[in-house]
Image (cartoon, rainbow, N blue to C red):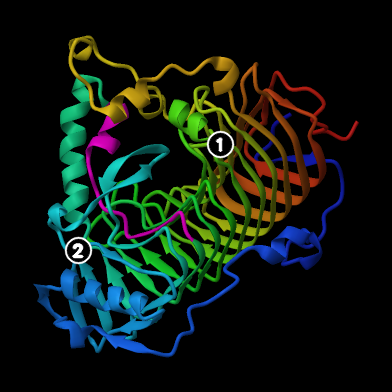
Amino acid sequence: MKSLQFIILLLCGFGALGQNNSSIPKFTWMENAGSHTFPDQKTVFRAEDYGAVGDALVLNTKAIQKALDEAEAAGGGTVTFKPGVYLTGSLFIGNNVNFNIPKGTMLTGSQNLEDYKQIDTRVAGIEMKWPAALINIINKKNAAITGNGTIHGKGKVFWDKYWNMRREYEPKGLRWIVDYDCERPRGILISDSENITIDGIVLYQPGFWSLHILYSKYVTVNDVTISNNIEGHGPSTDGVDIDSSSFILVQNSNINCNDDNFCLKAGRDSDGLRVNRPCEYIVIRDCYAGMGAGLFTIGSETSGSIRHVVAYNLTAEGTSFGLRFKSTIQRGGKIEDIHLANITMNKVKYPLSVDLDWNPAYSTSLLPEEYKNKTLPEHWKKMLAYVDPKDGTPKFQNISFSNIKATGAKRCINVVGIKSSTIEDFNFSNVTIQGENSGAIKYAKNWKCEHFKIKSNDDLLLENNKNINLENN
């Protein structure tokens, strides 16, 4: 059945799609998400007293780091700046230290990669050596980055480096490794740390991911603005990436970027399965996404599993994807107990997407013949390690969508599982999506739909589904 505006009614009746607090889950664990402490030691350490010069020309890495180190040695305190523009390489914040960037102050990242210390870290799901971020909190407790000032990564030089390498690598069949070979500093890295607060800062133009929370717990990100499309569109300039971490709270934040806006990850392929650390107990609320590849994204790195997530009161305007789930058959991991509520999307091309064969050119590591007798870097070997399908097939299940509205979509819904991994136990309540095309649901099982409506110009494609209750019989 087709008409000018074909309407699919999934069950019957519709309520208001405004904010509805009754649709927000209230799990006991949610009260524990976020930092439980804050570095409130009274001593102030002024960067200029250690030789920092805010003229945008002098490299201040050593001076600022000295202030940070002395603050930690003194048992904690606040490191801050007088107004100015401070050029720096990678900085490392210590225990009990509040790194305060006040209004009128900008930290700008060096465009010389040698100014970023090489560290052991995880990059896009693989543990390897990589440049430190511009600002780092690693193996620390009770630390913060605060203020209404600006961190400017000056990352375009690293974006250009990536595109040049991409043009070189792709003809050689090496698309899958270029992101790892092209070293680019992140904006902020929080790694192996606990009770961390990021509050009020503005972050521009990182060379790679903006804010990476890795192997950490009890972290609060509040009132952060990220804008990465200055001087172009930076590749892989994700907004907030929460990676194999737990009890994380992200709120009141605004992201424009050129990849996933708010994203959950848990490791890639063989290396991610080896590490096997979940991303869990996550709350994301009261946030906005403009330009970017996904308002709320899970994946593609899913190996350690992602679970116990609540995201609510979110808005997207013009984002490519809205609620996005992506993985591949060598990633593995179980994605479950995800709750999404009170979400509005306007002119989002793909409001709901699930893809178990995401970006094969990037996701599938195949070594070209001419490299098979050569000595390979260790991170290449990790990427090429075989993953048994019984370990590598991801599972998406038990995901709820409530009080959600999308308008101006290109394709309303695109949920594509595979025969060996159906998309199971999706629950929809008071959801309406309007767009040009309905889309498709394939290999889905045991869905419950109450007040779920799709408005489009064509029929919804349904294939290989079981018990998804899409029509009121």
Q: Is residue 246 above or below residue 6?
A: below
Query: Where on the picture, by quarter, is residue 404?
Result: bottom right
Label disc, if present, on residue 304 of the rendered structure? 1
Locate residue 440, reporting x and y percent. 63, 30
Q: In the image, what residue occupies the spot 51% across and 30% down?
A: 273
Q: Report the span colored magenta.
A: 175-193
Instruction: Indicate the position of residue 395 as horizontal and vertical percent values.
Output: 64, 29
Up/down of 112 relative to 37, above or below: above
Find the distance from the CA under tag 1 to the CA under tag 2: 32 Å
214 lies left or right of 86: right
Amino acid at pointer 2: Gly
Is residue 121 left or right of 343 when viewed as pictured? left
The quadrant the C terminus occupies is top right
User: Farthest right residue?
Assistant: 473
Which sits earlier in the primary sequence, circle 1 or circle 2?
A: 2
Q: Is residue 185 magenta?
A: yes
- Identity of the amino acid at label 1? Gly
| Placement of 189 over or under 8, stated as above or below | below
Per the image, label 1 sits on a secondary structure element best described as loop
* Residue 113, percent from left and from top: 15, 53
**Of the pair 250 and 326, the residue shown nearer to us:** 250
SS of the residue under disc 2 = loop
Compared across the picture, whether 13 is left or right of 229 comes to: right
- Residue 143's spot in the image, x, y percent? 45, 71
Q: Nearer the viewer, residue 456 or 134?
A: 134
Direction left: furthest residue: 57
Image quadrant occupied by the N terminus: top right
Q: Which residue is denoted by mark 2 in the rendering?
A: 89
Residue occupying the point 19% across, 20% down = 172
Residue 24 visible in the displayed image: no
* Magenta span includes 95: no
Residue 193 is left or right of residue 419, and the answer is left
